[in-house]
Image (cartoon, rainbow, N blue to C red):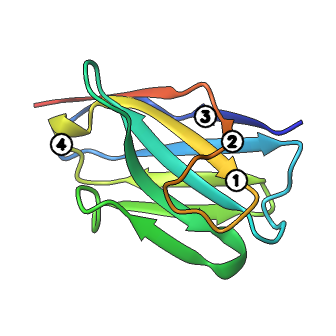
Amino acid sequence: QVQLVESGGGSVQAGGSLRLSCAASGVTFDYSYISVAWFRQAPGKEREWVATIYISGGIEYYADSVKGRFIISPSSAENTVYLQMNGLKPEDTAMYYCAADFRHSIKGDFPYWGQGTLVTVSS
């Protein structure tokens, strides 16, 4: 059974950085055709796609709102996908979730989800 566990959230001031982790069990991230994505949901707003990496192809995708500030990267050794978040803005405040799918998917219906980690950015 695939399980995803996020960590690394916290409170930072605008302009700061955080690195989120998505640790997996029940699957290895060097498996072919696996995509891992980050989504976020702010209070009172709909869930928003943030970034995806198609691990076997080494292809990264980013929402325009985070392009140039966030970097998604895998670690096969640690079976973890990271989201490095730089230049954080108050509008980045949200619960961040990672999700996985055994196919090349960018922001579709991911079947596996973590429980989320909270990021709060103060101005």
Camera-side residue: 88 or 41? 41
Mark found first going from the N terminus, 4 or 3: 3
- Residue 47, how many percent across, how many down? 38, 35
Question: What's the distance in space between the residues labelled 4 and 3, CA to CA?
Answer: 21 Å
Question: What's the distance in space between the residues labelled 1 and 2, CA to CA?
Answer: 6 Å
Q: Quadrant of the N terminus?
A: top right
Asked if disc 3 and disc 1 are in contact, CB closer than 8 Å, the reply is: no
Dot 1 falls on a residue whose secondary structure is: strand
Residue topped by disc 2: 111
Residue topped by disc 4: 89
The image shows residue 86, relative to residue 114, as above or below, that is: below
Disc number for residue 101: 1
Q: Amino acid at mark 4?
A: Lys
Question: What's the distance in space between the residues labelled 1 and 4, CA to CA?
Answer: 29 Å
Indicate left or right for 47 with 89 as reference. right
- Residue 40, how many percent across, how many down? 40, 37
